Image (tube, rainbow, N blue to C red):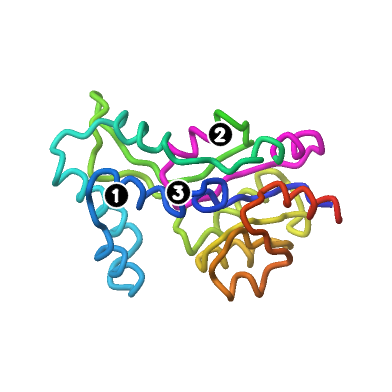
Amino acid sequence: MIKLIVFDMDGVLTEEKSSWHYVHQRLGLDNSENFRKYADNEITYDEFFKLDLKLWLNKFDKLKKDVIVDILREIKIRDGLKDVIEYLHRHNIKSVIVSGGISWLSDIIMARYHFDRAYANEIFTDESNNILPYGRINVVPDKKNIVIKNIIKEYNVDSSSVLSIGDSKTDYSMYIASEYFIAFNSDDDFIKKISDYSINNDITKIIDFLNSY
């Protein structure tokens, strides 16, 4: 029996593939060079994170948290997510978000849909709510297994009762920490190949998977 489900956020719970990319676009910025450096292992994820924030602050000397939160509120959440979370509550299945996305977006989703917990990356602000050029990295995208192992210990569940749901190549790190894995709306052939189940767009299909166990 599945007792814990770990959800990636960007591209799974949201229609937008990357909350970071969406914010960059709305601010009129391009972080593709920073992403290339990270993808090619020229910089660490910590450096990538700080460079993204530096892009924002180079253009906007004083950038308020509220500006970014308002942009994040524009991101469309998957239709049917409410039905999925209500199903999990009825069946006493824990729901946790583990994402390399922005924690302000996971806060929005948590408040709206009542997940049990969320782990995402935090951007720090000063006493006036101005964004600072650093934060706290709680989730390295290709090392989500570390976070999931800690969650398993916290909830005292057996790893054989854990399902993870992701969409990208970095979510292989979710796969290796879980007994079951769903590829959600993924365009990565490898991720789809290793998954126990593959879903396109309709998030309520998660319920069908759970009902089969």
Q: Is residue 112 left or right of residue 51?
A: right
Q: Which residue is mark 1?
A: 25
| Image vertical order of residue 49 relative to residue 92, above or below | below
Q: Amino acid at mark 2?
A: Met
Q: x and y percent of residue 49 in the render? A: 31, 54
Q: Which residue is mark 2?
A: 110
| Image vertical order of residue 57 relative to residue 73, above or below | below
Q: x and y percent of residue 90 in the render? A: 80, 34
Q: Nearer the viewer, mark 2 or mark 3?
A: 2
Q: Amino acid at mark 3?
A: Asn
Q: x and y percent of residue 136 in the render? A: 37, 45
Residue at the image position 63 percent from the left and 56 percent from the top: 165
- SS class of the residue under badge 1? helix
Lower sequence index among marks 2 and 1? 1
Cα–Cα gap, marks 2 and 3: 16 Å
What stretch of residues is rendered in magenta?
85-109
Quarter of the image with the C terminus in it: bottom right
Residue at the image position 13 percent from the left and 38 percent from the top: 61
Q: Which residue is mark 3?
A: 138
Q: Nearer the viewer, mark 2 or mark 1?
A: 1
Residue at the image position 14 percent from the left and 44 percent from the top: 59
| Image vertical order of residue 205 relative to residue 124, above or below | below
Q: Residue 108 in magenta?
A: yes
Q: Amino acid at mark 1?
A: Gln
